[in-house]
Image: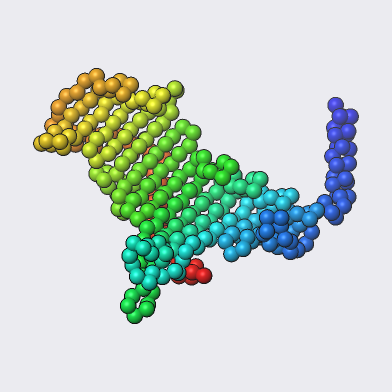
Amino acid sequence: MKRFYLGFGLTITIIIVLLSSSTPTEAASKKVNLKLSDGATYYGEVLNGKPHGKGTARWGETEVYSGDWVSGKRQGKGKYTYTLVEGGGVPFEDYDESNMGHGTGEFTTKTYTGSWNNDTYHGKGKEITQWLEVQYLTSSDGKVHPILGSYINTINDGTFNQGKMSQGYYAIHSSDTVSLGYTDHTTTIALKNDYFNEKLTGDKDFFDTIINYKKKHGSSEKYIGVKPSEFSKGTLTSGKFSGVTHLIDYSNSVSYSKQVIMKDNVLKENHITSAVFDKDRKKIIHEFLQAIKSYSVKINTISDEIMSLKDINYEEMIP
């Protein structure tokens, strides 16, 4: 046994000596300027004529990456920034159907900070994307007036797999809607609200929020769904729902009902009072909040972040 340890120590010593005697060409050089095959300009460390180590690449005025490189590819930790302007700053001479769109500018910014592998997002990271549409009208005195239009802001914060988030939290804030949620291979949490301006638990009754919760359990999924006029609790098996659904019917005078459903087929339906409907609704929302308790702090945090995201400074982006 003693001889084994002596031999093992000798092997380690040989490996260390070999590594320490590596030629300079096998280590990243000092920072240099390169022109990459895809047209990018690069400044940073190089190995065998390729980006390797720390460095920054620029693709015109649109894209920048700064971070780790391995054999010419983005790999390790890094930050990517993307900026695009389409049609910005083209004014309408007159606003009519014949020239509609000639004065429309679209502005997009994107940043991703996190892990990379083989030139794409892979691993832990955070992506923030903002899109804004602006229309330009020319008044009779010749002045150009920007009219802000639609916008969409998105945050993805989690684990990415080959460029797409596979697990984590997200928030989307468009001109009139906010969506929040979490997703992984077993759990889906989704909330959507028009003109949402509260934290997740700010409105105890979620009167204007659409909720979807799915949690895998064996071959099925536990399911909770809440809309302003209905809510459901049960299981999903191969996409088919079994459980109980409460409904509001506005077709004539307002009425309330409770359905028992098996694989998307209604087995039984009873009319209930509004008081029973409201009581059962509060119960199911309480159950939903308990089910997502471990996620709620992070969902509230990303909700605050999306609502406080600064607008695109589009005027500085106009060429």
In this view, 103 is above or below 8: below
Which residue, as the protein is rendered here, is positioned at the far front?
98
Indicate left or right for 58 with 177 as reference: right
The colour scheme of the drawn protein is rainbow
Query: How many marks do you count on the picture?
Result: 0
Q: Quadrant of residue 221?
A: top left
Residue 297 visible, this angle: no
In which quadrant of the rendered image does the N terminus lie?
Answer: top right
Indicate left or right for 138 with 208 as reference: right
Residue 74 visible, this angle: yes
Q: Quadrant of residue 246?
A: top left
Which of 241 and 142 lies nearest the eye of the viewer? 142
Q: Position of residue 211 (x, y in %)?
A: 33, 39
In this view, 132 is above or below 170: below
In this view, 228 is above or below 32: above
Which residue, as the protein is rendered here, is positioned at the far left?
253
Indicate left or right for 291 with 54 as reference: left
Which of 14 and 203 lies nearest the eye of the viewer? 203
Name the residue located 41 percent from the left edge and 70 percent from the top edge: 91
Q: Position of residue 71 (x, y in %)?
A: 74, 49
Name the residue located 62 percent from the left edge and 57 percent from the top edge: 65
Name the residue located 59 percent from the left edge and 56 percent from the top edge: 79
Q: Position of residue 241 (x, y in %)?
A: 33, 25
Name the residue located 51 percent from the left edge and 43 percent from the top edge: 165
Which residue, as the protein is rendered here, is positioned at the far bottom?
141
Q: Position of residue 174 (x, y in %)?
A: 37, 53
Indicate left or right for 49 with 7 as reference: left
